[in-house]
């Protein structure tokens, strides 16, 4: 899965968690929490959905690596690749 595909996965999760947010104007290099009304519970929901939908585990120590869409792509793409190589 490419970094752009990973970003789409994250955006799909955010759209489900925060349906009132306008995701069309998000900047990929700016912290998500600075652009949207996401609180810590919403962020935890994103992490939980990654695990539930895709089997991706994100340890609490790595949460800051999910701050922007770009960093989500960089951090999660290798995790998705590792999952697909196991199949």
Image (cartoon, rainbow, N blue to C red):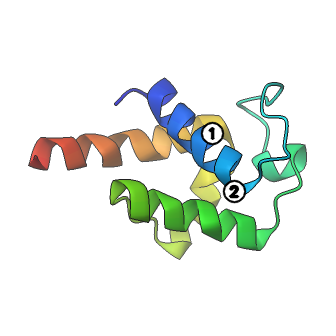
The number of discs equals: 2
Q: Position of residue 78 (x, y in %)?
A: 33, 42
Residue that appears at 82% across and 59% down = 38
Question: Which is closer to the viewer, label 1 or label 2?
Answer: 2
Q: Position of residue 2 (x, y in %)?
A: 39, 26
Q: Is residue 76 left or right of residue 55?
A: right
Nearer to us in this view, 38 or 53 = 53
Q: Name the residue under label 2.
A: 17
The quadrant of the picture occupied by the N terminus is: top left
Q: Are there few (<14), some (14-19), or many (20+) residues within 10 Å of tag 2? A: some
Q: What element carries label 2?
A: helix
Tell me which corner region of the image, top left, top right, bottom left or bottom right, holds residue 69.
Answer: top right
Nearer to us in this view, 29 or 48 = 48
Q: Are there few (<14), some (14-19), or many (20+) residues within 10 Å of tag 1? A: some
Q: Which residue occupies the extreme left position in the image?
A: 87
Between disc 1 and disc 2, whose residue precedes? 1
Q: Position of residue 47 (x, y in %)?
A: 54, 63
Residue that appears at 36% across and 53% down = 54
Residue that appears at 73% across and 73% down = 41
Q: Is mark 1 on a helix, strand or loop?
A: helix
Nearer to us in this view, 74 or 15 = 15
Q: Where is residue 48 in the image (x, y as percent from the top left)?
A: 52, 68
Q: Name the residue under label 1.
A: 11
The dot on residue 80 is: none
């Amino acid at each position: 899965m490419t970094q752009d595909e990973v970003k789409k996965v994250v955006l799909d999760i955010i759209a489900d968690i925060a349906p009132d947010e306008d995701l069309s104007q998000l900047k990929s290099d700016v912290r998500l929490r600075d652009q949207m009304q996401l609180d810590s519970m919403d962020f935890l929901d994103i992490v939980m959905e990654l695990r539930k939908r895709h089997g991706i585990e994100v340890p609490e120590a790595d949460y800051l690596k999910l701050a922007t869409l770009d960093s989500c792509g960089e951090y999660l793409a290798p995790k998705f690749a590792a999952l697909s190589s196991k199949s």
